[in-house]
Image: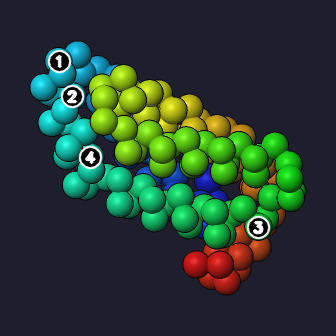
Amino acid sequence: MKRVEALLSLSREHHQALVVASRLGRLDDREALTACWRQLGETFFGPLRVHFDEEEHWILPLLPEGGELASRLLGDHRELRRLMDGREPAQWRAFGRCLKEHVRFEEKCLFEWLQMHYSSEQLLAAQCVET
């Protein structure tokens, strides 16, 4: 399904997240992985936290309270935040896997649900109120 205007910026950020997840999955060398993780800490984690906050303040109120979509959104964000503090390569690789699965969930389930239940105008209006 084509993305409505209100969700386009988040979808673009999801593309960048998939690039990061793929990069983490390809690195075998501990030194290269460490350098990559350090760079992500300097350039990617801050905007990713902002992305999570935006989704939680804007999208979460649109979801059925206590439902599976809301639970998954919050659970994934909590786990990804925890993994961002990881100090070992196994945690960094787990972050990449979790990030990839989370983006797939949002694009294929969450955003599809939003577009089926809200018009583009409703999503834009909610975005303006919540952000």
Q: At label 1, which amino acid type do we have?
A: Asp
Describe the element under mark 2 as helix, strand or loop: helix
Q: Residues within 10 Å of mark 4 (few under 14, many from 20)?
A: some
Query: Is mark 4 in CB contact (under 8 Å) with mark 2?
Result: no
**Spatial separation of the CA atoms under disc 4 and disc 3:** 30 Å
Q: How crowded is mark 2: few (under 14 residues within 10 Å), some or many (20 or more)?
A: many
Q: Circle 4 sits on which residue?
A: 40
Q: Circle 2 sits on which residue?
A: 33
**Of callouts 1 and 3, which one flags the residue occurring earlier in the amino acid sequence?**
1
Q: Residues within 10 Å of mark 1 (few under 14, many from 20)?
A: few
Q: Does residue 50 lie above or below 100 as drawn?
A: below
In the image shown, does 2 or 130 lie closer to the viewer?
130
| Residue furthest to the front | 87
**Of callouts 2 and 3, which one flags the residue occurring earlier in the amino acid sequence?**
2
Question: Residue at point 63% right, 63% down?
Answer: 56
Q: Circle 1 sits on which residue?
A: 29
Q: At label 2, which amino acid type do we have?
A: Leu
- The reply, left or right, for residue 67 in relation to residue 85 is right
Q: At label 3, which amino acid type do we have?
A: Pro
Q: Circle 3 sits on which residue?
A: 61
Query: Is mark 2 in CB contact (under 8 Å) with mark 1?
Result: yes
Query: Is mark 2 in CB contact (under 8 Å) with mark 3?
Result: no
